[in-house]
Image (cartoon, rainbow, N blue to C red):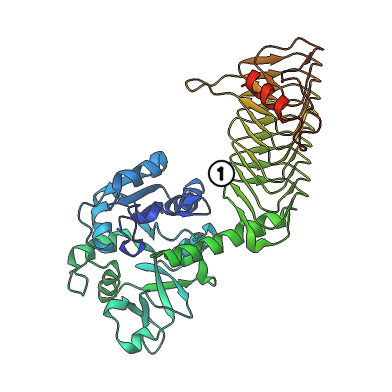
Amino acid sequence: MDRTAIILAAGEGTRMKSDLPKVLHRVCGRPMISWVLDAVEVLREEGLVRRILVVVGSGGDRVREEVGERAECVFQEERKGTGHAVMTAAPLIREDEVLVLTADSPLITVATLRALIREHEIRKPAVTILAAFMDDPKGYGRIIRDGRGKVLGVVEETEAGEEEKSIREVNTSTYVFDWRRLSRVLPRLRAENAKGEYFLTDALALLAEEGGELAVWCTPDADEVLGVNSRVHLARAEEVMRARINRRWMEEGVTIEDPSTAYIGAEVIIGQDTTLRPMVILEGRTVVGRRCLLGPGTRIVDSQLGDDVVVEEAVVRECRLEDGVSVGPFASLRPGTILRSGSKAGTFVEMKNTVVGKGSKIPHLSYMGDAEIGKEVNVGAGSITCNFDGEKKHRTIIEDRAFIGSDTMFVAPVRIGKGAVTGAGSTITKDVPPGALAVERGRQRNIPEYRKGTGKKEAAELERDNP
């Protein structure tokens, strides 16, 4: 049977109290609607769905931009409920069946959708409803059955009486419909309810009146059908998704010492035998190699790490760290930084748009910005590249095996030649030839007996001559 998937994404999400459309709120780094699209796209690849339609409304342009070429968007100008949303998409449907699901259910799995479709194919009812049993069913429509267990329909909570509200079997707003039958009853929906909306659930009773069977497939995992309607729900969805992601990586051979404090984005890749210590955050398209040690207290965003990398209490953003690199503690690596194999950015080191050669070390308390540092260079504590002149950024080049004395200031643009040395406390404004020693600082004079007062006249003269 040919099948269309309709993803309902038009809701305003008033309980989120946000200018951002509800379905664009993020779970583990990705908008909710993208998680749903991922699952449905797998069904399309497997031939279980032919087309994907997304009904957009509130914040429609922003939602369309997120959807991109992954699906066809249909604009629901007036948001009059779930039934009205399906009516809006109806003119585009040519298939025999429709899979209807919501964009605010990011935890839905491909396996559950497959099982729902399989149940529908076997029984061939008018509709197969995805249901779940919940300890706290508040906010969900309840499945109504007769004394023999036959499904009669669904009642929304706003329309339910006290006895109906006690039912724990809930509708998850995910269905597979026989489209010919559904399209016949859609025009008969009425907005005669507390919300003044056209409920898709009302179509179920109309299908039953026509003699159609209402089938139910119940997922054993109520978490995966969580509908996100508030920030509290969003936090719960994040918690469940994060646990799934962490479990997956532990099964792939990654040690996570404290899964409750490990935050791993959906697109992150981690190699075997890597260890994540407490409070590690991996975001975006970060790739981590094998046998790395990350944390505690480390955040890495959109970066590539080779094998055997150690990052402790540091922030790394849009950087590349090759094999055997060591970073931290308390380091900040900003976009464009590359650390070659075996190099080090140590305690309280900040870098931006800088390349550090193999085996080079910036051990502590330094800023290297817009710099090229060669192989086997040692940068002493407190050294800084003065890369900005108030208008433009300039580069500092430090060639192989240079030795940089502590507290060296490089006024860029400047080049330090191979094997050159800078004296501690120097401000380097000119290029230093290979192998040379560059020293730039005032000559030290010691004035004896200054504290006794006899040397104060000499000190005053010195200060006058060297203002």
Q: Is residue 132 above or below residue 465?
A: below
Pointer 1 residue: 284
Q: Provide residue 382's location: percent of width, then percent of height.
A: 70, 33
Q: Quadrant of residue 421?
A: top right
Query: What residue is shown at x 58% (from left), y 59% (from top)?
Result: 242
Which residue is outermost to the top? 433
Count of number-bearing discs = 1
Q: Nearer the viewer, residue 454 or 284?
A: 454
Asked if residue 106 lies left or right of residue 413, the reply is left
> Looking at the rendering, in which quadrant would you find the N terminus?
bottom left
The amino acid type of the residue labelled 1 equals Gly
Query: What residue is shown at x 26% (from left), y 71% (from top)?
Result: 202
Q: Provide residue 294's location: percent of width, then percent of height.
A: 72, 49
Q: Is residue 341 above or below residue 402?
A: below
Query: What residue is shown at x 27% (from left), y 75% (from top)?
Result: 205
- Is residue 271 something one can see in this rendering? yes
Q: Is residue 33 above or below residue 80?
A: above
Category of crowding for the residue at label 1, using alpha-carbon neighbours closer than 10 angstroms: few (below 14), some (14–19), many (at least 20): many
Asked if residue 230 lies left or right of residue 236, the reply is left
